[in-house]
Image (cartoon, rainbow, N blue to C red):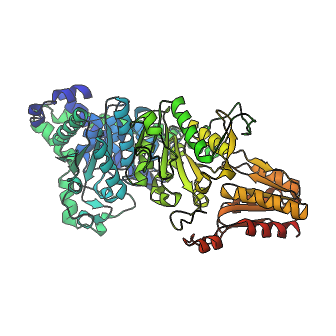
Amino acid sequence: MNKQEIIEAVTDSKNIKAYSVNTVDKTTLQKWYELMTLGRALDDRAPNYLKQALGWSYHAPYAGHDGIQLAIGQVFEKNKDHLFPYYRDMLTAISAGISAKEIILNGISKATDVASGGRHMSNHFAKPEWNIHNVSSATGNHTLHAVGVARAIKYYNSGGVAISSQGESSTSEGYVYEAINGASNEKLPVIFVFQDNGYGISVPKKEQTANRYAADNFSGFKNLRIFHCDGKNVFDSMKTMIEAKNYVIENCLPAIVHASCVRIHSHSNSDKHELYRNDEEISCTKAADPLLRFRKQLIHSKQFAENELLEIEERTKIIVSEAHKAGMAAPSPDPNSIFDFVYPPAFVSEKYPEGIPGKDGKSLKLIQALNETLKEEFRNNPDTFLWGQDVASKDKGGIFNVTKGMQAEFGNKRVFNAPIAEDFIVGTANGFSRFDKKIRIVVEGAEFADYFWPAMEQLIELSHDYWRSNGQFSPNVTIRLASGGYIGGGLYHSQSIEGALSTLPGIRIVYPSFADDAAGLLRTAVRSEGPTIYMEPKSLYNDPVAEAIVPEGFEVPFGKARIRRSGNDLSIITYGNTTHMALRVAEQIAKEHNKEIEVLDLRSLIPLDKEAIIATAKKTSRVLVLHEDKVFAGFGGEIVSIINEEAFEYLDAPVKRVGSTFTPVGFNRILEKAILPDDQKIHQAALEILFY
């Protein structure tokens, strides 16, 4: 019987209850034993690779989870369902169809590893072409991705389910609560499997939660059904997973499957369970071995003779041996490949290759440029979506009304509010984008950039998904953040955070100063593959100083700075709010001292226009780096380093920086003024460089 026939055979409740060694045909039982034997052979063999210094430096043995893992893989339908296994899910992966060779290639980190080409940690099993997803080492964070892809399954009515698997201890993570809360609220087709072996490494379950079962922590959630099974028992696990999947598909509601397991071995090959488990407990776990139990059932049922099972075990040894030989012969990753797949392809403008507009267009404020561009892109691509906090409430569109009118035009399936949970907003965007490469997502990551920190865990995932998957998956997500000060907002409303975000490879960061660039950069971000942080200087939303002529369909490529004022005596390199300060100071100094200052607006921080930076430094020989963020450890330090390394001999004065003090931003306007850069501070610094 194939997977679908097995599922259909036990669809009605009567058959489900009767599911046992005596009601499943011999062909299927043989297949299951082959899979379980193969899995255990690889599970037992994995530590030997480490001992021989051949790889597999991290292995979390699954022995004791055999029943539930076999069942997860058996109910999974490739290219229809979406599976998010965790690091202990070796048998899950094998049961889902991943071969012994592919398991070994992953374990010893070979270039031909289908999960990541040796880039990700061993025991992180995946096959993206089948929708077996490459997940993080941060346990349980893929629950958010599963919820996101389940949202897409429901929206596109594609059938199937998302299956997220994890240990019970990872349910202590806040993002797991966010995922299950969101799935129950949105009524999404997702199964959360908790494989409960009683330990989080060495920490017993009683120190994780007051409930006996971790699933009971979610028992109060509406629209959520909880199933329990013996994860050591093949038949109970199969019955429960099939029942859960049928329930989720028929009702389009989420479910939890709580599987009680045992962990026969240590947590991993870097752990010694003898240090926290006594001999009696370890002996009991071995006595509960699901594979031995299943083998005995096959013999006692008289469907198999001892010699038949021995033949299967011998064939398994041959399969593993051949897989080992193939794995050892496979190529190792090329060290020259480390820069491959850091950033996916960006949209390239043919009409505006330098991102410089013509004279045609209409005059727009910065907020209008953002709003109109979003609407244009939504009309251009029907697979574009937007969600976030407070972004779709009647006539309101976000705290600043940037998304005003979007839900009215595009409907509440494409534009909708999310819970006040930044990690959920970003994590489900990652998951939703996994459904189809054509999808583009814009999220308001937080109402103010300062509130974005809870989402950093998911931003990390966005940053290295493309690299980690060896170019197989790129989350096409634009994260909008209202940034900066000058509004009297104080903490959580006036901080600049781009300096911290710019340390993450794989994330593009743009920061416009004028309405035209705001439109052009947003259009490029939405049309490009990969994640982009879109910083919006909120004090300029309605400020006439940022108003500009915006051509229809204007595009600004990534990594292209723009000279906003030409000069020969000093270069001010800047972006965002401080661009306008630089322009005012330049005009003032021209009148006072007849000195012409060039103002280079970076627009794009990652990627950075190094050529433009070096060119302006060579041209004027004097440079002031200006930004709103803190000077100490701020982004400007990278610009100074580039100039010192590549244009030092052209300098006639030291490069100087102006920015915020190394303090939080105060709420009182007096404190804010003392902390943030302003015209006076910039004027003084510019004169010091000019007359050095």
> Is the residue 345 above or below the residue 675 in the image?
above
- Left or right relative to 638: residue 222: left
- Left or right relative to 174: residue 625: right
Residue shown at the point (33%, 52%) measured from the top left: 61
Residue 357 image position (x, y, % from top left): 73, 38
> Is the residue 571 above or below the residue 684 in the image?
above
Which is nearer the eye, 110 or 348?
348
Residue shown at the point (23%, 57%) measured from the top left: 217
Residue shown at the point (70%, 66%) measured from the top left: 678
Residue 71 image position (x, y, % from top left): 25, 39
Which is nearer the eye, 157 or 442?
442
Count of numbered circles on the image: 0
Q: Quadrant of the N terminus?
A: top left
Q: Quadrant of the C terminus?
A: bottom right
Which is nearer the eye, 499 or 555?
555
Residue 124 image position (x, y, % from top left): 42, 47
Res 644 seen here: no
The quarter of the picture where residue 487 lies is: bottom right
Residue 462 image position (x, y, % from top left): 50, 48
Res 170 seen here: yes
